[in-house]
Image: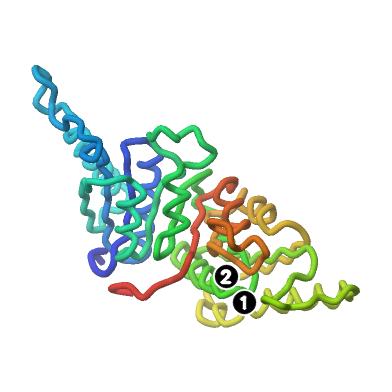
């Protein structure tokens, strides 16, 4: 069956090896989903008002515009090697990388990008483009980092929030497509407010609280287990930092899935404290789910 209908999987490229790694991951995602793949190179140089063509006396195929087209051609060829059944298109789009990819995300089933590229900020802990797109894209974003594995589970962070429920849905779909099991992780330290104005008791029963957290975790996956009976599920309740727990689970995971924000007190950060920590330190690719939209072909 040709993967040529519905909203595309979009991947950004910049000529780096990490970007080609992202293209390979995006091609597999498009194949799983029976969707086309759209490869985009954000071409910022027109905004800089610099010459785009070959320099005087240089070969005709020189210049920044031709280089961008070669980046794109290499990426399209790489995608064809990984998933020849997927319909692939590519385009050089004028603009800054974050701006271009956020615009592409409006009509995409998924945006895929590498954790670093060739830009001047490549030495940062994580590329600025990956942070900005993950924080603001309309739909889910897959950041390719760490080791790509053909084995291992899909891991999802659970905290009972609405975004956590969307992340669980996304994780079950991924596990079903990949033919692997799912590990649902819920980490806790102490009772936390459920909402504004919530007053916590000064003394609480730790065993009763642990039972409540176990119930939250079980309920988070129960309905989806019925919908995806082919996906084996393991529930993992951890007392400790949620970010640290998910980073540790990522060591043997194919993919880690988190919501962009949860119910924690630091949820007002750019991504939320947990997703921000995992984005920077995971040992595997990471999917960040802000919300799942109904897109063409969904």
**Residue 209 pos. (x, y %):** 81, 75
Rendered position, 52 above or below 155: above
Which of the 4 image quadrants contains residue 201? Answer: bottom right
Is 60 situated left or right of 258 in this image? left
**Residue 110 pos. (x, y %):** 38, 61
Rendered position, 217 above or below 52: below
Disc 2 target residue: 164
Classify mark 2: helix, strand or loop: helix
Q: Which mark is residue 220?
A: 1
Mark 1 or 2, which is nearer the eye? 2
Is 150 situated left or right of 161 in this image? left
Check if mark 1's residue and mark 2's residue have beta carbons within 8 Å.
yes
Circle 1 residues within 10 Å: few <14, some 14–19, many ≥20: many
The residue at the point 26 percent across, 46 percent down is 95
Q: Which mark is residue 112?
A: none
Q: Nearer the viewer, residue 181 or 10?
A: 10
User: Looking at the image, is mark 1 or mark 2 earlier in the sequence?
Assistant: 2
- Real-space Cα separation, disc 1 to disc 2, in angstroms: 9 Å
Circle 2 residues within 10 Å: few <14, some 14–19, many ≥20: many
**Residue 73 pos. (x, y %):** 21, 41
Classify mark 1: helix, strand or loop: helix
Specify the quadrant that holds the C terminus. Answer: bottom left
The residue at the point 62 percent across, 57 percent down is 274
Q: Nearer the viewer, residue 75 or 177?
A: 75
Is 153 situated left or right of 8 in this image? right
Rendered position, 259 above or below 221: above
């Amino acid at each position: 069956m040709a993967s040529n209908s519905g909203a595309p999987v979009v991947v950004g490229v910049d000529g780096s090896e990490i970007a080609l790694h992202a293209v390979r991951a995006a091609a597999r995602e498009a194949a799983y989903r029976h969707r086309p793949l759209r490869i985009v190179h954000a071409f910022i140089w027109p905004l800089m008002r610099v010459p785009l063509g070959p320099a005087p006396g240089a070969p005709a195929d020189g210049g920044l515009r031709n280089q961008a087209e070669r980046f794109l051609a290499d990426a399209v060829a790489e995608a064809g090697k990984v998933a020849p059944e997927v319909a692939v298109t590519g385009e050089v789009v004028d603009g800054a990388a974050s701006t271009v990819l956020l615009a592409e995300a409006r009509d995409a089933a998924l945006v895929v990008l590498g954790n670093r590229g060739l830009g001047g900020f490549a030495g940062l802990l994580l590329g600025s483009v990956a942070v900005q797109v993950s924080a603001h894209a309309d739909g889910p974003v897959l950041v390719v980092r760490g080791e790509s594995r053909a084995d291992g589970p899909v891991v999802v962070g659970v905290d009972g929030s609405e975004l956590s429920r969307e992340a669980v849905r996304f994780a079950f779909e991924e596990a079903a497509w990949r033919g692997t099991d799912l590990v649902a992780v819920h980490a806790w330290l102490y009772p936390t407010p459920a909402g504004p104005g919530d007053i916590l008791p000064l003394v609480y029963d730790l065993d009763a609280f642990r039972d409540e957290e176990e119930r939250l975790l079980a309920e988070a996956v129960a309905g989806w287990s019925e919908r995806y009976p082919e996906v084996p599920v393991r529930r993992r309740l951890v007392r400790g930092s949620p970010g640290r727990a998910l980073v540790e689970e990522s060591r043997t995971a194919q993919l880690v899935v988190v919501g962009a924000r949860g119910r924690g007190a630091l949820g007002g950060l750019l991504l939320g404290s947990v997703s921000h920590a995992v984005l920077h330190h995971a040992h595997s690719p990471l999917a960040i789910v802000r919300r799942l939209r109904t897109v063409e072909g969904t």
